[in-house]
Image: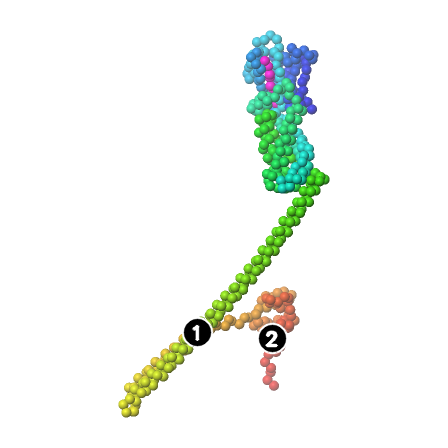
Amino acid sequence: MGIFNKNEGGLMDVIRCDEQDYLIWKWSPGGSAGTSRKENAIRKGSRISVKSGSVAVFVYNQGNGIEQEYLYGPVETKLDTLNLPILSNLISLLYNGSAPYRAEVYFINLATIIQIKFAVPFFDMFDPRYPEFGVPVAVRGSFNFHIPAGENGYKHFIELHRLDDFNIERFSDQIKNSVISRVKSFVINTPAKYGVSLLQIEGLVGKIRDEVFNELQPIFNAEYGVSMSSFEINSIELDKTSDGYSDLMYITREQIAAKVQAKTDVDIQNMRDSQRINAEHYEDTLRRQREEDQYARHMNTQSNNFAAHQVNRQADIAYATADSIGNMASFGGGSADPMGMMAGMMMGEAMSQNMANAMNNVMNAQSMNGAVPPPIPNARYHIVINGQDAGEFDLQAISQMISDGQINSHTLVWKQGMANWVEAGTVFELQGMFNNTGVPSIP
């Protein structure tokens, strides 16, 4: 691959690069080798041809120092003052002198992307948890770089490197060694940085790749004048045949087993504690319910007794009042007093009404406090008719269906609480319906 070539020789009228695959190429006019005065000669009227994606760099001595001028492709024209004002200094020297002017011309390919594969040979790494076990680790990957386009790109590259002494193989090795050094440093620090075992480092290839790429990009530009296009880590390999790897695997398995057992013990203890707390809570709930029921019955009894006591007291008062009125009626010689009798009748009626009201209050209190019994539950059964679940029916509906001949004792039924479908004739609750044949005829 002609990455960097020199074409020795004499004068030529056309300045161009015919190489297909190169990064930096130096032009020299054709002629006999070793004629140093003519080696880099450019005559008036020479033509220049620069391909797209390339730049031609003219390096010449103007007396007060080295000058550089640039011609960015694509361009193909004649070296004169009208066509190339950008090379004004060089053109002026060419046309003011009578002999060809010596200048070095370098072609830089801005479109070429150089790919380099790298390998970090096995080096010992240590798990931060068990630093006594060293495991050999190797890293393999690749990266691409190119010379950036634009004046700030290739000019910066030329400032950093001597074009007449540039060697692509030496330059690639220099970049590769820098990459290897930084990749190794990142890999060594990864377990401690992310708090993971050395055995898990293979799963962090993506994170290591991104961090190395982000760090290398500005370094490539600042130190080497090139741009890193991509960076990949293909593998991080642990030497699984080494003693350090075997020892680390063994102690890691032991630690994992101990953690699993400890967690299981904690889970079992938590379950037992939860069951004990639930049992205690259930017993406390039952105790509170019993106490509340006893208190409610006690208050109900007290209320009923108090109402009965009121009735008895009112009855005693009524009797005493009646006796007093009777005595008043016979007062004065034993003859009946009509006014007294009428007052007694009215008082008796009032007492009777009071006693009736008191009894009603007792009955109402007993009705309110005496817990009206709940409604009788009405069982409901699912019934199979023609191989399908016909729905849910109560006992009254089932009795009517038996009378209509829709179902018989072999019909399958099921209700909440049953394990399986059973024949209706085997259900105690339904047996009486099948035995009831109706009212017998009069003999």
Q: Which of the numbered marks, if any, corresponds to residue 302?
A: 1
Decide: is 260 above or below 305: above
- Give the extent of the magenta segment: 54-61
Task: Residue 153: give x, y in percent of width and height.
Answer: 57, 24
Q: Based on the displayed image, in which of its 4 quarters is residue 225 positioned?
A: top right
Task: Residue 358: give x, y in percent of width and height.
Answer: 39, 77
Decide: is 265 above or below 318: above
| Residue closest to the far top | 98
Residue found 47% across the figure and 73% down from its top: 370
Residue contact between numbered discs 1 and 2, judged by CB atoms under 8 Å:
no
Per the picture, the main secondary structure of the magenta-coloured stretch is: strand
Residue found 53% across the figure and 62% down from its top: 281
| Residue closest to the far left | 332
Residue found 59% across the figure and 56% down from its top: 269
Asked if residue 195 lies in the magenta stretch, the reply is no
- Kindly identify the amino acid type of the residue bearing the numbered disc 1: Gln
| Residue closest to the far right | 241
Q: Secondary structure at mark 1?
A: helix
Q: Based on the displayed image, in which of its 4 quarters is residue 69 positioned?
A: top right
**Marks 1 and 2, how far apart in space?**
46 Å
Q: Residue beneath label 2, please?
A: 433
Q: Nearer the viewer, residue 202 or 39?
A: 202
Q: Secondary structure at mark 2?
A: helix
If you read the primary sequence from the N terminus, does the residue marked by circle 1 or circle 2 appear first? 1
Q: Quick check: 347 left or right of 126? A: left
Packing grade of label 2 (10 A; few <14, some 14-19, many >=20) is: many
Residue 21 is at least partly visible in this image: no
- Kindly identify the amino acid type of the residue bearing the numbered disc 2: Met
